[in-house]
Image: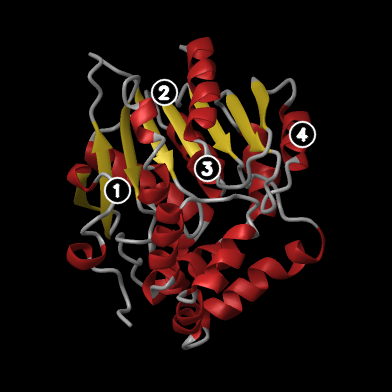
Amino acid sequence: MEHRLDWDRDGADWPHRAHSRFVEAAGLRWHVQRFESARANAPRCLLIHGTGASTHSWRDLVPLLQPHFELLAMDLPGHAFTSLPAGGTFSSQLSLPGMARALGALLQAEGFAPDLVVGHSAGAAIGARLALDIAARPGMPAPRLLVSLNGALLPLGGLAGRIFSPAARLMAVLPGVPRLFAWRAGDAQVLQRLLDSTGSQLDDAGRAFYRRLAGNPGHVEGALGMMAHWDLPAFAEDDLPRLPTPLLLVVGERDATVPPADADRVVARLAGQVQVKRVSLEGLGHLAHEERPQAVAMPILAAWRDVG
């Protein structure tokens, strides 16, 4: 079992491979996909996937957004074909602020200033932290809209919230755990149970890509390291209330990973501070943008027209 995914072998049939390249920034080798728009002077949209995913998760949403935006997507640090930071799972670059800073360095290297940021799950929190970082720089306008797709913006409640990060920290540093997890995830039934736990139903291609990712110890190591460093209580307390960017919450009502009620709590927390709107997607789960990309693209485009 190879420790890291190999682009020539594992990426041979990667979605939108023709748009892929590798970029050095913040001490990392990033896998980046960039999509030009046929529209002249098109606004720029940044796509940030969630924990354990990769650029593949945008495969069907990209064609729906590309007529309207120039798009940039990447594999987050330690995920899929982007390298793990020096220091491995101990690296602060796997924390929420660390990922936002590293992503900011990538954007600078690419000369890409996003007008719209679309983040899925943990990617929404990274997008919010990135918007704060950009707004703090003199002469740098913040993105005009942040879209949270089933965003993990608040701490997990109950027992899960108390053990999530400690358990992830333990698993990330124990020798052999990523390889053991990858070995188990190579079982199609085990992977299907993991995907079912999101509340989403994916097609065969979607399941195959997640099986490829979850079956690779290097990718698992990156995802565990990210979870081990994640501090949503601090983010929700210190960062989220200062969000400078209008926020659209797109919520799959069958999401079994991030409770849909969390979106209502975010709306209540930000009321009167920044423009925030919640849109419900009935019958869709945590991976709604992979289940029914058209249903996700429509509210994104509508919200952009409102701010554009």
Residue at 51% x, 51% y is 202
Query: Nearest the camera: 136 or 200?
Result: 200
Q: Residue 141 got which mark?
A: 2
Picture quadrant of residue 88 = bottom left
- Name the quadrant containing residue 230: bottom right
Residue 43 coordinates in the image, percent (x, y): 34, 20
Where 41 falls versus 163 (above or below)? above
In the rendering, which numbered label is found on residue 15? Answer: 1
Percent x, y of residue 187: 49, 76
In this rendering, the answer to whether 199 lies above or below 111 is: below
Question: Residue 265: where, in percent of width, then height?
Answer: 77, 37
Give the CA separation, mark 1 to mark 2: 32 Å
Residue type, label 1 = Pro
User: Mark 3 or mark 4: which comes first in sequence?
Assistant: 4
Which x, y percent locates residue 199?
65, 51
Which amino acid type is shown beneath numbered disc 2? Pro
* Residue wearing tag 3: 291
Amino acid type of the residue that numbered disc 4 sits on in the rendered structure = Asp
First reached walking from the N terminus: tag 3 or tag 1: 1
Mark linked to residue 67: none
